[in-house]
Amino acid sequence: MTSASTAQSPSAEPAKMVEVTGEPSPNQEPTAPSAGGGGGGGGASAVLRRRFATVDAQVDRFSWLATAVVVAIAAILRFVGLSSPKGKIFDETYYAKDGYGLISRGVEWNYKDNVPSYVVHPPLGKWLIGLGEWAFGYQDAESKVSVPGHLMTTAPEFGWRFSAAVIGTLSVLLLVRIGRRMFRSTVLGCAAGLLLALDGFHLVLSRAALLDIFLLFFVLAAFGALVLDRDARRRRWARALDDGLDPSQPGRAGRPPTGWRTWPWWRLAAGVLIGCACAVKWSALYFVPVFALLVLLWEVGVRRSAGVRRPWRDALLDELPWLVLAGVLMLATYVATWSGWLLTDDGYYRLASAYPSAPLSDRPVIGPLINLFEYHRAAYGFHAQLDDAHKYQSWPWQWLLLGRPVAFHWSGDGACGAPTCASEILLLGTPLLWWSFLPALVALAWLGLARRDWRAGAILLTVAAGLLPWFWFALDGRTMFSFYAAPALPFLVLAVVYVLGALIAPAGGDVGEVAPLVPGDPSYERRLVGSIAAGAYVLLVGLCFAYFYPIFVGKVIPYSDWLSRMWLDGRWI
């Protein structure tokens, strides 16, 4: 996330001017904007400046240094020992092979039987896995494939897990910068990134060649682009009001100047990014209506703050075309990720002549698109009928409670200095962090309503997009796993950090606002206790992570030590 001057700097006064809802905060006097933006002399009033304030665009070395430290911690945890355990774990047996097929033939390919593979997920995540295999080499004894890397040849496990580790580390970077931009606080941004870096669920997904870490990354990146779009649009309105714009005027006369420089480029980028997310897994589609709703709510809020007479009507007229264009870019991006399938003849369902019983077509141009549609229909049918029992399946209401984690790897082999040993990779969230999510969501809802805070609403809506659709599928008995919650994870962490920020904020101040602890201040004792509690919480999450670390990375430990970490007994075994 592009960001700059730290909110901790005493001179960073604009960072304290946080618009929350487009309305005066409870401790401010309502001020009706006058013509010309409420400035009387052709400038924005102090209240409007406060509502439209965003993070400075000036680079802040301290915030980036702090970010680098958090990202370095995440990278070390994700890359050290990445090639262990040996062999393909859990669904790597599918995605590592599919990744190699894509980089070698442009489509997923079954080298054992020398036929195209039938797959039910889009290709982008597997393309990224294959990129690591291209760089560092690939081996598969079953398919009798062994190729060296183009950059260097390492253990094959490192190759197919490399991209997941990179993307997992980058997602920590994104969350730090998104958190800092939303909360106007380097401390809270880094806290969000550190909590994500120290989460076992995120760590395990970052060290395995599965698709869900890529889905998480692109959804989070799309959200970050929309936050940047929100800030850019507010700066656009602030500049126009400073230049004497009268928002009460009808038509273009009451709107900021237009031109390609003022286009919502970040919103269009979000369309591309959510297209990438859909090209990893279709479940990214659940975020599309939520993201569109957030854009409209933010655009209505800025117009209402500026004094536009009909903010809803104007927002719909001005922004719907841009949302449609973002949707077109999303679709174009998605189709582009299928280019290997479209531009070759090897893919499953690609040629009608190879599948005479399927309703396919070999007509020029339109034929491949018809066949791609039919392929999608078949894949959707697979997902709609997926109800086979599985040892590690779970229900959505169990996920935040860690009711049934997924074992990616288990072995009783290896030396550990004890009569019996155990090595496991368990997709388990750091318990103290995950068991904080539900209380944090309740507190977030209460604080958000009390403060009319756009950040609370944005976090709650994105969490809902990541979790609630699965409750509907649960009614049909669909087979589901806890890693389906992956794209909601960064927003759950933001919920926790929001509550931590409320604990340390000054009385009447904004979450993330920094003010010195001064004895005698009315909120001194509350803020002191809150600061100690917030710091202790992050420390305890770190200690909890360290305790469970051996079963996040498959370290060989005595069986008794492994068993002592199975806190929920049979639910975790």
Image (spheres, rainbow, N blue to C red):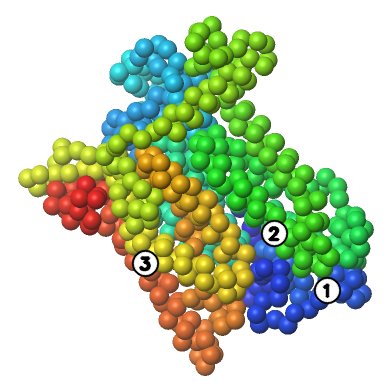
Q: What crowding class fits label 1: few (fewer than 14 Cα within 10 Å), some (14-19), or many (20 or more)?
A: many
Q: Is residue 311 left or right of residue 41?
A: left
| Residue 151 seen anywhere in this rendered image of the structure | no
Which is closer to the viewer, label 3 or label 1?
Answer: 1
Dot 3: what SS? helix
Dot 2: what SS? helix
Badge 1 or badge 2: first in the primary sequence: 1
* x then y, percent, for residue 18: 66, 70
List the residue tagged with mark 2: 298
Quadrant assignment, res 21: bottom right
Q: Nearer the viewer, residue 218 or 405?
A: 405
The amino acid marked with disc number 3 is: Leu
* x then y, percent, for residue 421: 14, 44
Quadrant assignment, res 9: bottom right
Mark seen at residue 33: 1
* x then y, percent, for residue 278: 55, 37
Q: Are marks 3 and 1 in contact (CB under 8 Å)?
A: no
The amino acid marked with disc number 1 is: Pro
| Residue 328 seen anywhere in this rendered image of the structure | yes
Residue at 67%, 76% (x, y): give it: 25
Badge 3 or badge 2: first in the primary sequence: 2
CA gap, disc 3 and disc 1: 46 Å
List the residue tagged with mark 3: 539
Q: What crowding class fits label 2: few (fewer than 14 Cα within 10 Å), some (14-19), or many (20 or more)?
A: many
Residue at 40%, 17% (x, y): give it: 110
* Residue extending farthest front: 476
Mark seen at residue 543: none
Which is closer to the viewer, label 3 or label 2?
Answer: 2
* Residue extending farthest bottom: 520
Residue at 21%, 43% (x, y): give it: 423
Q: Image height check: is 542 above or below 416?
A: below
CA gap, disc 1 and disc 2: 18 Å
